Image: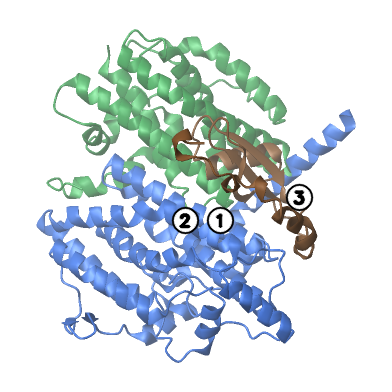
Chain colours: A blue, B brown, C green
Amino acid sequence: MYAQMITSEATQDDPEKLAAFQARIDAGEKIEPKDWMPAGYRKTLIRQISQHAHSEIVGQLPEGNWITRAPTLERKAILLAKVQDEAGHGLYLYCAAETLGVSRDELTEMLLDGRMKYSSIFAYPTLTWADMGAVGWLVDGAAIMNQVPLQRTSYGPYARSMVRICKEESFHQRQGFDIMMKMANGTEAQKRMAQDALNRFWYPSLMMFGPSDKESVHSEQSMAWKIKMNSNDELRQKFVDQTVPQAEYLGLTIPDETLAWNEEKGGYDFAEPDWSEFFDVLKGNGPCSVERIEARQKAWDDGAWVREARLAHAAKKRAAKVAAE
Amino acid sequence: MKQEWPLWEVFIRGQHGLSHRHVGSLHAADAEHAIQNARDVYTRRKEGVSIWVVPAADITASSPDDKGSLYDPADDKVYRHPTFFDIPDDVGAM
Amino acid sequence: MSVQGLIRMGDNTLVLGQRVSEWCGHAPALEEDIALANTALDLIGQTQLWLGLAAEREGKGRTADTLAYHRDAWDFRNLLVVEQPNRDFGVTMMRQFLFDAWHLEALKALTEHEDAEIAAIAQKSVKEVTYHRERSSDTVIALGDGTEESHERMQAALDRLWPYVGEMFSTDEDDLMDVSALRPAFDAYLETVLAEATLSRPDSDFAHMGGKTGARHTEHLGHMLATMQVLPRSHPDATW
């Protein structure tokens, strides 16, 4: 997911306060910025929300890669609007993280120096126009699985930004599928691109949900705090079950020979992605990991004079106003 | 010491006659910049809305520990809640 | 009514929209990233209207998309200023400001055009471009006045782009209006903004020409079109 491998922080607070806090969460109450919260809850949330925000910002890059090459004016406008939405979503999420006592600049620096991560999926390249379809269809499809339940998460600012994000994101997956339909029903070359995009994005999409969390203590804590709403396996299964018929509709083949309907569980059996690849990507060895951070670093460095100048101008205006009064 | 653009809270009146509602936050160097950013980020520039921006640092908030004294007294004034009044159906919408 | 005049309007917004969209994901702050995308989206939308009308009036079965994607550089009729590369944020915003200041005056005049369809496009665009000019003006003022470095960058940007300003006011019978008449209003507005921005208008009024006539574009346009047009050109029988 956009926030992967988030380990919940141990918490050493007063047991009585902890119990009262848990009772509030169990009762479905929202926790707000000024409310008392366990240190571990705060830390885990900062890491999770920031990683989600970083994923949105880094996630602008693979799709941004095709804005200048979109094949029609309408496709260009739609893609630009979508990537712009991702910037907006990053912004909402950074603001939610800021309510927990960190600044956006601090978080940005932690992304750039590798202390914080972004979703593994955005370390993969977008090589043809069909990838714009595959990213919308598969990547946004997977993200939505996680984001819809997060609208009910226990932390108020996070839940509210999620509501806004889900509302704006509703067209993202559809536009991706729409591109895939055109490609899959298009020329021979377009069909090839569509199948190739599915081949390349299928397993990275499955990885988005993170490794199986059957054994994870951390997941349990996060689920009790309602900052993680479903298990990784549960969401991955749901994603596969939803996507297989869509691929069939497109006339595309999911690159998994073991894929089969399992009557008993009422879902598909499918092959696990290569988890060693996943851990390599998380370590910064994804095909585009270096380029992604380089691009963010360049934007940050190149923009420094602009950010400083804006502040300097604001200070001069304030001074002039005071002098005039 | 590096400085960051300050944080602003954004309030938008979506339609005439409604009050401004908090929609989110953003960073901007000054008030004019904050208004423009709010327009770009939160309205995607739809016409006919009114925007307020307030420096987040200038907001005074009640402390959650005061919750009891601030909110409990109203709890027994149930007549403040519209559902208290039983309006006969044939009066129509109210 | 001149199809070339419509194509000029549409090529300006197309080429500048394409340039501005290159920023998506790379701007100095998230707020600026989103604002630039809004500008680019407006310009692409205006392109669809202008080139759509041009194609219709031409009556050769072309569309806004075929005009955008299946013409070579010498058939483009945009001003040289909009095909200039983004370079840094200062050049990008100065280019935007200079174009917006011209564009808004041009559109205001076109709202009175005798051709109702032209007036309608102008009317819709005026609303958007009024905001473009407000935002780019404020940015030029803030960055011109801001720090020593930002001041230097903005003055350098103005000096770099100034030779492309004169072309905006050169006119011929293909134009939808006499654009030379827009110069006084442009100059007056420019003066107020540059004063607030503490920037100096360059002395020389030398002007490069050749964009709007197609006689001589800069080298930059060909590269931009190579990127922009690659898919429809490589797959002419495909629909997207």
Q: Name the residue under label 1.
A: A92
Q: Name the residue under label 2.
A: A165
From the viewer's perspective, is residue A91 above or below residue A317?
below
From the viewer's perspective, is residue A46 above or below residue B63?
below
Q: Looking at the picture, tell me which residue is in the foreground, C17 or C226.
A: C17
* Numbered mark located on residue B59 in the image: 3
Disc 3 on helix, strand or loop?
loop
Q: Residue furthest bottom?
A: A215
Q: Callout 1, which amino acid?
A: Tyr
Crowd around label 2: few <14 · some 14–19 · many ≥20 (10 Å): many
Q: Distance between the residues labelled 1 and 3?
A: 19 Å
Q: Mark 3 lies on which chain?
A: B
Q: Callout 3, which amino acid?
A: Ile
Query: Are discs 3 and 2 less than 8 Å apart at CB?
Result: no
Q: Do labels 1 and 2 share a chain?
A: yes
Query: Considering only order in the chain, which callout, 2 or 1, is on the residue closer to the N terminus?
Result: 1
Query: Are discs 1 and 2 less than 8 Å apart at CB?
Result: yes
